[in-house]
Amino acid sequence: MKISILGATGSIGAPTAFYIAISGLADELLMVGGRRQNVLEHHATDIGEAAATTGCKVSHGDYEDLADSNIIINAAGAHMPLHLERSMRVENQARFTSDITAKIKKVSPNAVVITAINPIDTTNYAAFLSGGFDRKQLIGYSINDTIRFRQSLAGELKENVSKVECIVIGEHGPTQVPLFSSVKIDGKTTSLTEDMKKRIRAGMWGTIKIYESLDAGRTSGWTCAVGLTTLVRAMVEDSDAVFPCSVVLNGEYGLQDISMGVPVKLGKNGVKEVLEYELTSDEQEGLKNTAATLQSDAAIVRETLKVW
């Protein structure tokens, strides 16, 4: 099993490389960086020593070394000002991703590609439009939303997070839709008041506000590392496990030509199945709202890449 990580010197790529290497999921882990080649080599050497007893061979290289990768995690983003207008952020990242995806397709056309750089949904959609991959080979990482939903729920109900089940669908962003109809505690359906739901929604954004206030120039790298490794494990073990992921839709939930967070069943070749949950009336309204946002962004991607 060969797993490769692009953007491997960054705050998502480096922790993910470490976590995958020590997990024993890969026979070979390739780290591909950007301009800081000395940092890339340093990380690869250090992680290689840390993972020596797992049997995972850690190396560093460039895009041509992606050949024969089973899974590629793309954590490489375009360099943009922090407060750049949303449409420009979508456009710049789409163009950057288009170049990367073409390189991946050339040397490793059968790989499953996990997008782990914001904006997740439009970046995954850009990869689909530009790379010639089957949509089920392309996965946008959006589990963090569900992790925060579980944490906020557990805090409100004073339960252990491990006992809480729930899921978030829609945009990996402000219009995301937490499915309160999916909430279970210890496997049992749980009802919540509107006041509780309001506090839970507010709590979901608490971590984001902390990151923004700290202005550390980093993102939730360690959380992403754990989540990405969980996705990789599901594929390596061909487990059929269900996770929220952003995937290109083709009629599911009545939508198409966008990438959006939905529950999917994962296996060794990527997405096995998109699961369509029954939604309440307010969740359906939330879905319409998030879909409208993503459709607008998708139009920007198509215009940028000259694909109609």
Image: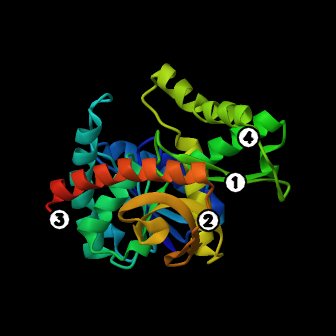
Dot 4 or dot 2: first in sequence order is 4
Residue 144: x percent and y percent? Answer: 57, 47
Question: Residue beneath label 3, please?
Answer: 307
Q: Amino acid at mark 1?
A: Ser
Look at the numbered discs 1 and 2 and tell me whether their residues touch, using CB distance below 8 Å: yes
> In which quadrant will I find the C terminus?
bottom left
Residue 277: which disc?
2
Q: Nearer the viewer, mark 4 or mark 2?
A: 2
N-terminal label among 4 and 1 = 4
Q: Earlier in the sequence, mark 3 or mark 2?
A: 2
- The answer to whether the residue labelled 3 contacts the one labelled 1, judged by CB atoms less than 8 Å apart, is no
Q: Position of residue 276 (x, y in %)?
A: 57, 68
Foreground pick, 17 / 96: 96
Residue under pointer 4? 153
What amino acid type should be assigned to the residue bearing mark 4?
Leu
Secondary structure beneath dot 2 equals: loop
Give the CA separation, mark 3 to mark 2. 31 Å
Residue mark closest to the camera, 4 vs 1: 1
